[in-house]
Amino acid sequence: MVSILINNYKHKIVQVTVTGHANFATIGKDIVCAGVSAIVTGTLNALHEMVVSEITINHKPGLVIIKVNTITNTNQIILQVML
């Protein structure tokens, strides 16, 4: 199962953790995981292009952690769109 944990502080997103596999199909053929991966990858690209100095990203197969170091309107909008 894909799990998404959102940590908030004063109604602002401070961390997003995405883990797991949807198990809809085998790894590499799973359309649910492909959809989640597309959304997360697009978000990472937007964060990297627009607010890279405000966040920390940790990613490896089956795990993505986005930590907000400095809360701004821009990074909050990007993360809210992802969610």
Image (cartoon, rainbow, N blue to C red):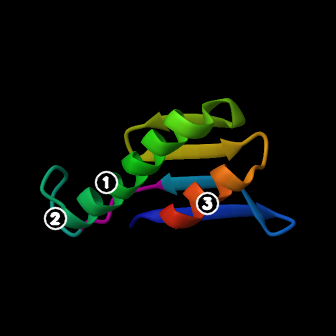
21 relative position to 58: left or right: left
Query: Going 70% across and 36% down the picture, which residue do you hit?
Result: 54
At 60% from the left edge and 32% from the top edge, which residue is drawn? 52
* Alpha carbons under labels 1 and 2: distance apart: 17 Å
Using the image, tell me which numbered label, if any, was put on residue 25. 2
Asked whether the residues under the numbered discs 1 and 3 touch, taking CB atoms below 8 Å apart as contact, a structural biologist would say no
In front: mark 1 or mark 3?
A: 3
- Badge 2 element: loop
Label 2 crowd (10 A; few <14 / some 14-19 / many >=20): few
Three-letter code for the amino acid on which mark 2 is drawn? Ala
| Marker disc for residue 38 | 1
* Element assignment for label 3: helix
Residue 62 seen by the camera: yes
Circle nearer the N terminus (1, 3): 1
Nearer the viewer's eye, disc 1 or disc 2? 1
Where's residue 58, x and y in %? 55, 35
Q: Give the range drawn in magenta.
A: 19-23
Query: Could you say which disc has been placed on residue 77 in the image?
Result: 3
The vertical placement of 64 against 58, above or below, is: below
- Is residue 20 one of those drawn in magenta? yes
Q: What label does residue 11 carry, if any?
A: none
- Asked which quadrant contains residue 55, the reply is top right
Q: In this view, does 27 lie above or below 11?
A: above
Task: Give the Cα separation between the discs numbered 3 and 2.
Answer: 32 Å
42 vs 49, nearest the viewer? 49
Q: Earlier in the sequence, mark 1 or mark 2?
A: 2
